[in-house]
Amino acid sequence: MKKLFAILLLLPLLAAAEPATVIRATELKKAPATDVATVAELAENSGVDVLERKGGWTRVKTSAGAEGWVKMLSLRYGSPGAAKQGDTGLSQLFNVAKTGTSGTQVTTGVRGLDAEMITNAQPNPAELKKMDGFAATKETSSSFAQRAKLKATSVEYPAP
Amino acid sequence: MKSLLVVLVFVAVPAYAQFNFSIDRVLESVKNVAKATKDIDQPEEISIGRDMASRLLGAAQLVNDPRLQRYVNNVGRWLASQTERSDLPWQFGVMDAPQLNAFAVPGGTIFVTRGLVAHMKNEAELAGVLAHEIAHVLQKHHLKAIQKGAKTSLAGDALSLALKDGHSEARDKLISFGTEMYARGLDKSDELEADRLGVVIAARGGYDAYGLPSVLQTLQAMNAQDSTVALMFKTHPPVGERLSVLGDRMQPMLDAYSNQLQLLERFNAEARAAR
């Protein structure tokens, strides 16, 4: 039953392989590691389909049909041409600007948590009290972590 | 000491208007106002945060599923315990809204929407988002923005009153201003800092450090015209820029902790109500 559920969850992923663009020239690797064979060289701005992600790696299929792994952060989601090469989000910003003027009211009509709702919100102390009841303590969350074998490890913050 | 400051503020400002005191005295009073607004202490931070959280819950209630709520509280509390403000009264809530968003409220209250949880693939992704929000609280990003705004919209003495008297008109103004901030957004540098600290906090908790970047890529693949992401995109730097900054600044750290746990199965079991 659980397996069936897992398969059902995967179905939408399989049905629609996500198109993505290689943002810098990169090697298509046979496995998710740097020290393995290179399947192909991918040129900057070439289009691929995303199949799965694993840690810092993404398995992709090229338009030529080659399959392999690239560093996750070498990819930008969307087809080539959907945004200009080297784009740091300007086109997205533009899209959002367009959405901002007309989108929130006219698109799908989804309400719930838009700017207007937040600005006009009235206090809901009953719901806040309910939330208090779900809080975890340091101790309960620590045993929750242990149950999944999560181990705390020391990692430094980056320099500001 | 603090009440003395408040008195000074009350006395100095009208006194100047009436008697044209020396410029030194004026500067002194300005300094006192600045000081009074700088010193929001931790109990005050927590108290303002609760009022703001109550407002946000007025905009969207919690998903009615105790299992989901307790799960998110456990993940979040475990992460918060790995930080320098581990003793705040941290609490976490999943809001029942189809929009994709998350909010950090001063004092340690974090919200994430059902819509965002529904787009996550595993517990490491949830941890990445919660850790980003925890970082906002650690760095007091919203609190500082509120203080900055309060200086222009409330006089120094009114802020003191707002902090002291939970039922004052000044308090209501302060909380309204603070809540509206979630519709306006923080400075870009605050968001990028929360990304960098967030991946570290998730890694400290034992999670695959790529959880947050994965969620950002999911968002990147979504249509910016979609009304469920409109507010989140409006109030954050472009996703492409957030990802490239993470890549530039954090790639070695991300790779060093990319083999930690993702916990797909536990996430699928515990967060089912969000889908």
Image (spheres, coloured by chain):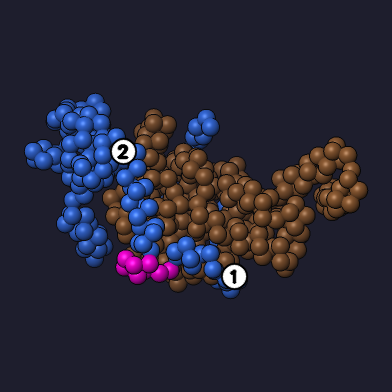
Residue occupying the far left of the picture: A64
Residue A109 lies in the magenta stretch: yes
Neighbourhood count class around disc 1 (C-alpha, 10 Å): few under 14, some 14–19, many 20 upward = some
Q: Residue at x 85, y 37 (%)?
A: B24
Q: Amino acid at mark 1?
A: Pro
Task: Tell me which segment is drawn in magenta.
Answer: A105-112
Q: Chain of mark 2?
A: A
Q: Secondary structure at mark 2?
A: loop
Residue B163: percent from the left, percent from the top? 73, 58
Residue A114, position as x, y percentages in the image: 44, 64
Badge count: 2
Q: Amino acid at mark 2?
A: Asp
Reading the image, the residue beneath label 2 is A87
**Residue lying at 38% horizontally and 67% vertically, measured from the top left:** A105
Which residue does the numbered mark 1 point to in the structure image? A123
Chain A, which colour?
blue
Left or right of A160 on screen, residue B67: left
N-terminal-most mark, 2 or 1: 2
Classify B87 as above or below A104: above
Q: Could one spot residue B261 in this view of the protein?
A: no
Tell which of B31 and B14 is nearer to you.
B14
Query: Would residue B113 be found to the left or right of residue A46 on screen?
Result: right
Tell me the SS state at disc 1: loop
Please give left or right for residue B76 compared with residue B238 in the image: right
**The C terminus of chain B - image quarter:** bottom left
Drawing shade for chain B: brown
Residue B190: x percent and y percent? 52, 43
